[in-house]
Amino acid sequence: MKSKVIVVSGVTASGKTTLVKCLHQNYSDSKIISFDNYDIDQLPTTPSIDVPLKEAVNQYDITALMKDLRKIYGTVPLILVDFPFGYQHQILRPLIDRVVYLKTPLDVAFARQIIRDDADKSVEEIISWAKTYLRIARPYFVANQEYIAENADLVLDGTLPLAEMVEKVQAII
């Protein structure tokens, strides 16, 4: 059996994980592979945030992710991959059937990230993160939205109702 591999891409807090989990509920014989489960961006080989995304994307070591993907490839009809780089990572690209990019307004993604990750932090810590976001992360996210979305098979507004996004993704599966 050949598995169909659908990658859902987008910036941090764009809604990738939520969409992948909902799709998985609709396809009970699917499996999920999530970038977040591998701490890839914490590896010593991870490029510095100041390296332009076009140069950095293939420097991310996805060996462990690929090992797990190859383990389940062919055992299920559908593999849903929560992965920020879409077709742009050369190692994953050959296995991808479709890429969905969630183009979520960056202010919405920023607010979602604070709500999700920073509820227990002090105001000072949140302000510090906001300054870092404006100086470093936002330019990276803008580049992500331009570079990763340009080759996606489907670009969705990440603020659409979840049921509508699922319906649109199902149409390309």
Image: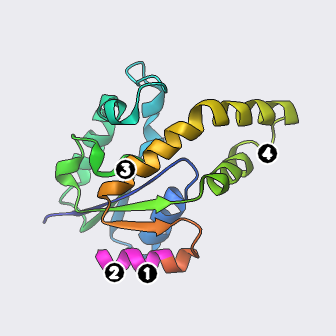
Task: Say which amino acid is labelled 1.
Answer: Glu
- Which quarter of the rendered picture does the C terminus lie within? bottom left
Q: Secondary structure at mark 4?
A: loop
Most foreground residue, 70 or 94: 94
Instruction: Give residue 167's mark.
Output: 1
Q: Position of residue 21 (x, y in %)?
A: 49, 64
Q: What type is the residue that disc 3 sits on?
A: Ile
Residue ranking furthest to the right: 123
Disc 1 vs disc 3: which is toward the camera? 3
Q: Residues within 10 Å of mark 3 (few under 14, many from 20)?
A: many
Q: Residue 116 location, x and y as percent?
A: 69, 50
Gap between marks 4 and 3, in whole Å? Answer: 30 Å
Q: Would you say the residues marked 4 and 3 are in contact, meaning their CB atoms lie under 8 Å apart?
A: no
Amino acid at circle 2: Ala
Above/below status of 42 relative to 98:
above
Q: Measured from the top left, where is residue 25 in percent x and y?
A: 46, 72
For disc 4, the marked residue is 119
Circle nearer the N terminus (4, 1): 4
> Looking at the image, do the residues carrying marks 1 and 2 touch, with CB atoms under 8 Å apart?
yes
**Sequence-wise, which precedes: disc 1 or disc 3?**
3
What residue would you read off at disc 2? 171
